[in-house]
Image (cartoon, rainbow, N blue to C red):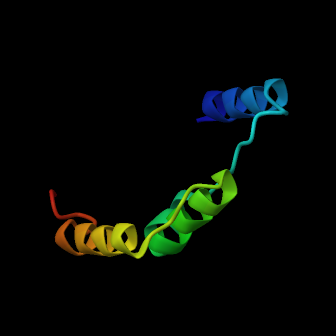
Amino acid sequence: MDTGIHRLIKFQRDHQHTPCLNIKYDDLLAQPIDTIRRIYDYYGLAWSEEFETAMVAWLRDNPQGKQG
């Protein structure tokens, strides 16, 4: 894991002018809709109620640990 952290730090240092949003995996698991909305807002992507409804349905049909 230490190598991965060093690679991330180097990438961020080497690409300071590239928009990069850091999110926590725990946030993605705990609040997936809000976290994805943050990503969309950060990158200026269009959000729709249809998209949110589809995400809610997918999350309902594919709960964490469903596959084992």
What is the total number of numbered labels drawn onto the structure image? 0
Query: Left or right: where does residue 50 sit relative to residue 26?
Result: left
Residue 24 or 39: which is nearer the viewer?
A: 39
**Which quadrant of the figure contains the N terminus?**
top right
Query: Left or right: where does residue 5 sit relative to residue 14?
Result: left
Query: Left or right: where does residue 42 sit relative to residue 29?
Result: right
Report the residue at 32% width, 75% height from top. 53
Looking at the picture, does residue 24 appear above or below residue 1?
below
Report the residue at 62% width, 56% height from top. 23
Looking at the picture, does residue 6 appear above or below residue 26?
above
Query: Left or right: where does residue 67 sit relative to residue 43?
Result: left
Looking at the picture, does residue 37 appear above or below residue 40?
below
Residue 65 or 2: which is nearer the viewer?
A: 65
Residue 43 image offset from top left, x and y in percent: 65, 51
Report the residue at 17% width, 70% height from top. 61
**Which quadrant of the figure contains the C terminus?**
bottom left
Report the residue at 53% width, 73% height from top. 34
Looking at the picture, does residue 8 appear above or below residue 51?
above
Residue 56 image offset from top left, x and y in percent: 31, 75
Residue 22 image offset from top left, x and y in percent: 68, 51
